[in-house]
Amino acid sequence: MKEIKKEDIKQGVFDLYDDYVHSRLNRAEFEQKLAAYAVNGLTVSALLSFIMPNYNSTVQVKQNDPRLNSEHINYNSPKGGGNINALLSMPAVINNQFSGLVVVHENRGLNPHIEDVARRAALAGFITIAPDALTPLGGYPGNDDAGRQMHDKRDPGEMLEVFITAYEYLKNHENCNGKIGVVGFCFGGTIANLMAVQIPDLSAAVAFYGGQPAVEDVPKIQASLMLHYAELDTAYNAGWPAYETALKASDKKYKANIYPKTNHGFHNDTTPRYDKVSAELAWKRTIDFFKMELK
């Protein structure tokens, strides 16, 4: 089988994958359209294998990392579906209380990648909680395809409540100093923007390629914002000009970054959409931002 390299892949493949992961194409439609790119020794099977997430070799911070106290907990979210599973992580050495971060997953539940991201943030000196909004349906099922199908069955308002009550859980945690931010990716980026609208006491929000709130709700935002967009992500970028106009009109504190030649999901190091340089820059900006805003 021909070895596939990222530079061999046409942009159309990434665009199709983006439509697929956002449920604009079902699996059969995705594979059918992908066949147009199965040329020059490439097969549909090889393309699928290459572009799908690889959780086995990409974890940066393992669950049992001795530098952390990291465990799965449950908390109650009455309007979010009841008892919610989440990963709670913090530095193993506790000298003082930590600022808190809610880490919001993509549209497939709390998969290994987002757990890894939550642990990375904890290593940077925060107490983090990464809930699984799919808990009422059994939780992340072990593969992203099934996770997306479950996600599509959940009520959006209930899922937002899952993360609002995670904020409240951190607010009351003995190891949290009460200064809390949120970081989310894709669906999670949308949630981060919505939490900034819904929670007046939220200190900071970072949205990676997320959907924007209604412009009429922007005046409610009190949190400082950092927004990361991928240049080639036309679907999510379409709402940015109106959002920026509303932020400026309401004199909100925000910083927006658009990363050249990147695709939606560029921070996710489990798929070929990953852009190492942009991902590392965006993450450094994110951690520096939280350290400034949550101090």
Image (tube, grey):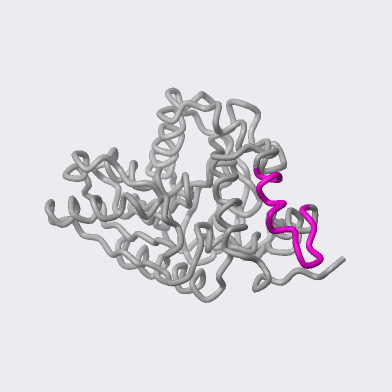
Tell me the residue at 72%/51% (across/down). Answer: 35
Pinpoint residue 49: horizontal percent, then vertical percent: 76, 56
Residue 34 is covered by the magenta coloring: yes
Tell me the residue at 70%/58% (across/down). Answer: 64
Tell which residue pokes out farthest to the bottom in this image.
Answer: 277
Q: Nearer the viewer, residue 258 or 291?
A: 258
Q: Quadrant of the N terminus?
A: bottom right
Residue 174 vertical position relative to residue 63 in the rendered view, above or below: above
Q: Which residues are magenta?
A: 30-44
Residue 280 is covered by the magenta coloring: no
Classified by dominant secondary structure, the portion drawn in magenta counts as helix
Tell me the residue at 65%/44% (across/down). Answer: 30
Pinpoint residue 202: horizontal percent, then vertical percent: 30, 47
Quarter of image, res 287: bottom left
Q: Is residue 165 left or right of residue 254?
A: right
- The number of numbered badges drawn on the structure is 0
Residue 13 visible in image: yes
Residue 176 visible in image: no
Tell me the residue at 34%/42% (across/down). Answer: 195
Quarter of image, res 22: top right
Residue 7 vertical position relative to residue 78 in the rendered view, above or below: below
Q: Quadrant of the C terminus?
A: bottom left
Q: Is residue 182 left or right of residue 44?
A: left
Q: Nearer the viewer, residue 281 or 78?
A: 281
